Structure formats: C-alpha cells, structure tokens
Image (cartoon, rainbow, N blue to C red):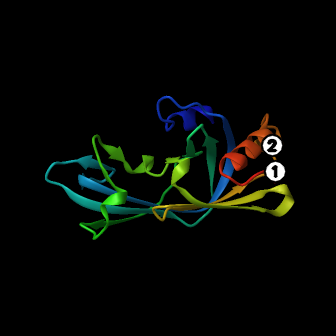
Amino acid sequence: MRMALEKYIPDGETLLAGIHAIAKETNIIGIFDKCICTEYSLRPDENGGIIALRKKKGSAYDVYLGITQSFLVIAECEKCCYLYQFKEDPEVGRADVQELTSELFLNDIGTCYNLTDIQKCEIKKGWMGSVKCNIAMKNGTYFKLLLPKLGGLGGDMPNHTQYRDTIIARLGGGSI
C-alpha cells in the first residue's frame, strides 16, 4: 500500500495515514492547456490546444486512500478501466486550466488533490461499521468511497481504525 501511495505524494509531504477503501463511483475532471492527446497520455505541445478530460468509473473497485499534511492521495489497488471523455477547445474559465510541463499519463490523472481543493466532504455511518465518504472537489471532480470497519484480508491490517479516523478528521469530518 505504501509503495502505491508514495508514487503520487508530492515532494516534501509525508504519508500520515493510509488505508484500503472501496471506490463506489469516480468522476474526475481535468482541463489542460497547450497539450495534445495520445492513446495513453497528454503531452505538452506549444501548438496544442485546451483539452477537457473526464475520467469516470461507475462500478466499485479497491483503492488505497492516503492523507498527508496537505494532500489526499488515491491509488488503485489493481489496474482498472475507466471511461475517458475528451473535449478539445472547450469554453472554460482560466482558473481551472493546468498547463502541462511534462507528459501526463491518463492512469495518473486523479490521484492527488490538495485538501484546500475539497469543496464538500460528507461522512456517514455505513453498514456493518463502515463509513461512507463522499468527496466533492471545487472543479467538479467527485469520489464516492466506502471505508471499511476493518482493513486487509481477515481484517488484520495494523492500525486501520486509527488511520481511518485520521483520514476522516483531516477531511473535515470529525470522528465517527
């Protein structure tokens, strides 16, 4: 789990807590300028235009959910397939447009978010001690997550409850 999450943690940040979770629904939005789209990535190009990307998955899949001092990190446990939708030269405000400086693989989009970009986080008790966590970002991206009561095969992931509570507290949900 640590290796999967650390791949996406920005320099200078430290993983405070990480757990196994279930993503029930994912809708990632990104707007990128001066780039071109290839089969597996977005590449910077001075002559490229603005590309709006939507990366969606409506079925449940396993993720590792981590939190640092300033970031929420989400990494797939196993490779997943997503629905990708692209729109070239969309009419958008400049606020959410990111200019690419290096190649960005489609699989790496939607893995790391600044905690200040969270618009809303709803935490509710779920079935059998689980916690439902719905996160909406300011740019329209959202995740519907299920944080199980116990982590790991047979529920033996060390410190799972403590780490889950740390993640919930950092997301602004208090403790359940």
Q: CA distance from mark 2 to mark 1?
A: 7 Å
Residue picked out by circle 2: 161
Which residue is under mark 1? 149
Residue 40, given in percent of the width and then of the height, sits at 34, 50
Q: Residue furthest left?
A: 47
User: Which corner quadrant of the image does residue 14 belong to?
Assistant: top right
84 left or right of 132?
Answer: left
Helix, strand or loop at mark 2: helix
| Mark 2 in CB contact with mark 1 (< 8 angstroms) | yes
Q: Residues within 10 Å of mark 2 (few under 14, many from 20)?
A: some
Q: Amino acid at mark 2?
A: Thr
Q: Nearer the viewer, residue 9 or 36?
A: 9
Question: Which is more toward the observer, 130 or 121?
Answer: 121
What residue lies at 48% left-to-right and 35% top-to-bottom? 10
Q: Is residue 174 above or below residue 14?
A: below
At label 1, which amino acid type do we have?
Lys
Q: Residue at x 37, y 58 (%)?
A: 96
Q: Position of residue 156 (x, y in %)?
A: 82, 38
Q: Residue furthest bottom?
A: 91
